[in-house]
Image (cartoon, grey):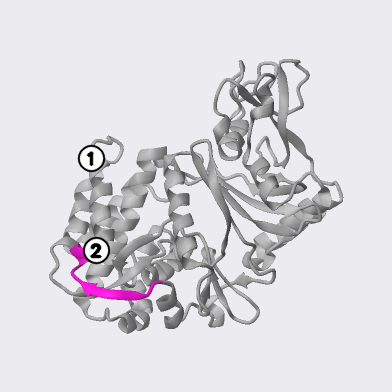
Amino acid sequence: MNEEAPARGEDSLHGPVTATPELALVAEQLWPTCASPDYRVVDHVGTHADWITVEQQRVIGRRGRIDVILPARRSAAARALAAYSRLRAIRPRLTRLALAGGVLLGLVPERNVVLEARKDIASDTVTVLRELAQTLGSDIGAAMHVRRSANRKALLHVVNRRGDTLGYAKLARNDVSSAGIRNEIQALSELGGGTDVVRVPRVLTAGTLGDFPYLVTEPLPPRIRAVTPALGDAPSIAEFAALSPVVRSGLPRSTEHLARMHSRTDRLRQVAEVEPLLGVLDTLLGHATQSELVMPIARWSHGDFAFWNVGRTPQGQLWCWDFENVERDALAGLDVLHWHASRRRERSGVEGVGDRAGILSDSLPTLRAFGVASPEKLAILYRTYIAEIVLRTLETAADDGWSRTWVSRTELIRLAEHTAGGGAV
């Protein structure tokens, strides 16, 4: 995605000239509702009388890439870049702080990305930042890391003219991201800020732009820091239970989550890219579907309860965000497995996720408190967890190709087959 297409006069997205990949990447995330010949995205302010500037964003990057979108005011941009630095590991934290200093001093090369509309419709054009300006205040800006992953969408750090954080905004760009954001809006609205044990961001506003939903949540506490298990601050049993409380007992096949997994699998049956892998997924799901074990069932599973989606305040209060993957009425303990599997994935990739013995060993104290302790129940829970990971990866490959998945097709088959057979990668 970092290769520039040959330019013919000017770089544009939807006008008479083909877009560069970089401009297209920005446009699909920041202006997804403007995907028509009535709009174009260029890297300079045009002079043609038939085109009117709708919105202009300042961007920085290197080697032809566009990496970050920033507010127009340098002081606000620098503060946005430096915000929440304690949530990052030391090396990216220092890199981000250095970048903030360079932006403030004008040492970082910048350029513009401009959304233009045909003259007759320009005054009617609505963008997400224009919508937010009406809700949060007219003088706002936003910082955004341009995403390149399969799950890419706009995630805007919205600030005022001083650089104070006003909130975080997500904007969908397709059916997949729309479903995730609608899921998150519903979950966060129900949680209403969370509990005394685990806090979650409140919804400031939500709406629809064109066919795409958007969500704005409140700022995180300013001094929030990353959760570091090595320092003894991993989530506690009480925190896991508060986030995903057990509400009933039942057979695995009675859960809404398992029923949805079967439906999602069926929707992939005719997709050539992934169809050959559905057999082993069916085997994994079959273990849970055919089980006669009565197991604890939670209100929901967060779906991505990992170190990158949690933090602690100086007082120790746990905060959790990113509820796009919430699965209602799910086996209790899936979030526990995901927490420990994510730590191993960070170190060892797919082999870490396939470390069944290590993940279950670390998870056992919390799972035992939930009522999942027997080898048979642990096996069902782990296989269901891996089935969900495999299914999400296949959905990503079907939607956006294997090049954007976190694991190769061969590695995924190996993980699924070893799990279905009771082994480890």
Helix, strand or loop at disc 2? loop
> In this picture, which residue range is highlighted in magenta?
244-254
Residue 98 location, quadrant: bottom right
From the image, tell me which residue sits under label 1. Answer: 269
Quadrant holding the C terminus: bottom left
Residue 258 position in % (x across, y down): 25, 59
Residue 7 location, quadrant: top right
Residue 254 position in % (x across, y down): 20, 64
User: Marks 1/2: CA distance?
Assistant: 22 Å
Q: Residue at x 76, y 53 (%)?
A: 160
Residue 323 part of the magenta segment: no
From the image, tell me which residue sits under label 2. Answer: 255
Helix, strand or loop at disc 1? loop
- Indicate which label's residue lies in the foreground, 1 or 2: 2
Quadrant holding the N terminus: top right
266 vs 62, left or right, is left
Q: Residue at x 64, y 30 (%)?
A: 125
